[in-house]
Amino acid sequence: MIFKFVVRKLRWLARIPLLPQLFDAGLVIATMLFDRPRLRAMERFESAICRKYAIQRRPHRFGGVGFFVGTTEIGHLHGNGLLDLFVGKSFRTEQIEQGRALPHHVFPDSGWISFWLRNPADIAQALELFEIASMYRTSGQLISQVH
């Protein structure tokens, strides 16, 4: 997968202004052309969180769309459906062990998790993870269980 190669081997390219956004735009175009269910899932996820939360959507510094409350980033969604959320280390470990999320694709030992939005069936789980990330980032406290 080209995304994994670029992130792991060509990480230094992210320092070049606008290059991450251009790369992500290419991911969105590829998703539009070759994976419509994933694109629908991404669109529905974004619509759902924008309806439920006082979220600001902004371009993310590493490509994709970032979700912010003020200056605090809750997470971001890449153009290939990869959702990255900050949930803290203890919740990250729990969710990875339960198979509900993956270690972050760049910083696997951090408090970040990654989750693939592949089709509309993945939206409910992505929203649950987003809820935890939102509570963690806006209150500084983490609840131990999801619904």
Image: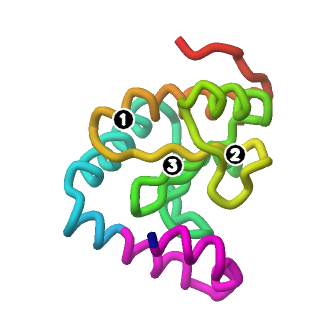
SS at mark 3 in the image:
strand
Q: Where is residue 48 in the image (x, y as percent from the top left)?
A: 36, 35
Cβ–Cβ below 8 Å for labels 2 and 3?
no
Q: In this view, does 33 lie above or below 94?
A: below
Q: In this view, does 145 lie above or below 5?
A: above
Callout 2 amino acid: Trp
In front: 95, or 24? 95
Q: Is residue 78 above or below residue 7?
A: above
Residue carrying label 2: 112
Q: Where is residue 8 in the image (x, y as percent from the top left)?
A: 65, 72
Q: Main secondary structure of the magenta part?
A: helix
Q: How crowded is mark 3: few (under 14 residues within 10 Å), some or many (20 or more)?
A: many
Which residues lie in the magenta part?
A: 2-27
Residue at horizontal 64 percent and vertical 14 percent from the top: 145
Residue at horizontal 70 percent and vertical 16 percent from the top: 143
Callout 3 amino acid: Leu
